[in-house]
Amino acid sequence: MPVSRRGFLQLLKSPEEAAAGAFLSARGLEAHFAEAQAQGRTARPPLPAGVEEIRISSNENPLGPGQAALDAILGKFPEAGRYPFNSSPADSALVSALADKFKVKPENIVLGAGSQEILKSAMRAFVSPTKSFVTALPTFENCTGYAKRYNLPITEVKVDSQMRLDVDGMIAAASKGGCGLVFFNNPNNPTATVHGAKTVTDMVERIRKASPDTVILIDEAYHDYVTDPSYESAVPLALSTPNVFVARTFSKAYGMAGMRIGYAIGRAETVKPLAALKMPYNVSVFGVAAAIASLNDPQHIADERKRNTEVRAFTVKALQDMGAKPADSQGNFLFVDIGRPAKHFRDACAKQGVMVGRDFPPFEKTHCRISIGTMDEMKKAVDVFKAALKAPITTTAGEKGGR
């Protein structure tokens, strides 16, 4: 029986069940607080009394999963007591569905608990005290945090003046010898910028020529939101090129951040080390069912891309009219030069119930990441942004300064 998003949550009667339902939606609190703790951050400030929250801080899909995914989740409650390999559909069915989608064999696919497990497995497999790691600055911090936590050799290459990954700089760093892994986030988080297919292909060729043993991880978490015509997925490149693989996730456009489903795709010999490091039972019965249903519902992704593109354009124009300077966004978020510390802007917005992104060094004194919510949310949020950008900045000494 079909059920709406709201109806799905209303089926959960007790407070404990309601909390579980909130987690299943892509906007649950659990992932946010867990991420905050893991990265040593303070969780978002409490809401003022009577203020409605607009949560545009974590690049989530504000609408959550599509209807087909919700129906699939609801249908799996009778099998909640089964392991994912012992349910119907089993996790192997999701591997087969992905293999069919990309016209590859199952051994070209490795599932992960979100793409984060894939990234951490890549660090374990390809980076060591004698094999360095090359990444961008800023970029998604999962791999960077792992390298720093275990004192692994790392080179962070600062993004260019347009907030795009510095391809030449990353090639140079990877070509010095002894590089085990390059992390190339395209579109990049937090800057939201993207490189076209020719640039990515040329980069891979140049790195492989200089350092053929180096593995190149191309993270396409925001692939479904890209509108730049020069962009193409690197999946075909990964399937035809040794030591290259792509990471994908159902957390973003598919609206399943709380379900934790991701995957790697590449040549079998490239992704085999990731399969060996995979956590047992790393995906859930609900996530598998929802992911398969989502793959069979391409209209949901088309609708979500259209919605995000429209709301993104509205938000970009509104911010530009305020004098702020968003980088070219190809995701469901913006990286905006607000001319003041992100903390001041974030705190001012939070007082009005609008939660925006955390600090991203080395741009925490000038830029803030803002995720794209619904059109109604962003219309309310831009009024808050306008007031926050006009507010005087209070320094640590208690003095007030202008923008």
Image (tube, rainbow, N blue to C red):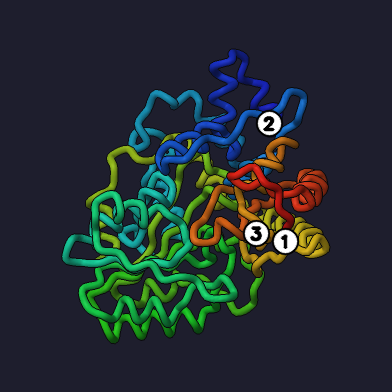
- Residue for badge 1: 309
Whether residue 375 appears in this view of the structure is no
Quarter of the image for the C terminus: give it.
bottom right
The relative height of residue 116 versus residue 321 in the rendered view (above or below) is above
Which of discs 2 and 3 lies nearer the camera? The answer is: 3
Q: Earlier in the sequence, mark 3 or mark 1?
A: 1
C-alpha gap between disc 1 and disc 2: 27 Å
Residue pictured at 33% horizontal, 81% vertical? 207
User: Given the current orientation, which residue lies at the most extreme top position?
Assistant: 14
The relative height of residue 320 versus residue 77 in the rendered view (above or below) is below
Circle 2 Cα neighbour tier, 10 Å, few/some/many (<14 / 14–19 / ≥20): some
Residue pictured at 56% horizontal, 70% vertical? 163
- Residue for badge 2: 3
Cβ–Cβ below 8 Å for labels 1 and 2? no
SS at badge 3: strand
Rendered location of residue 51, percent (x, y) = 76, 29
C-alpha gap between disc 2 and disc 3: 33 Å
The relative height of residue 290 versus residue 157 in the rendered view (above or below) is above
- Residue for badge 3: 334
Whether residue 74 appears in this view of the structure is yes
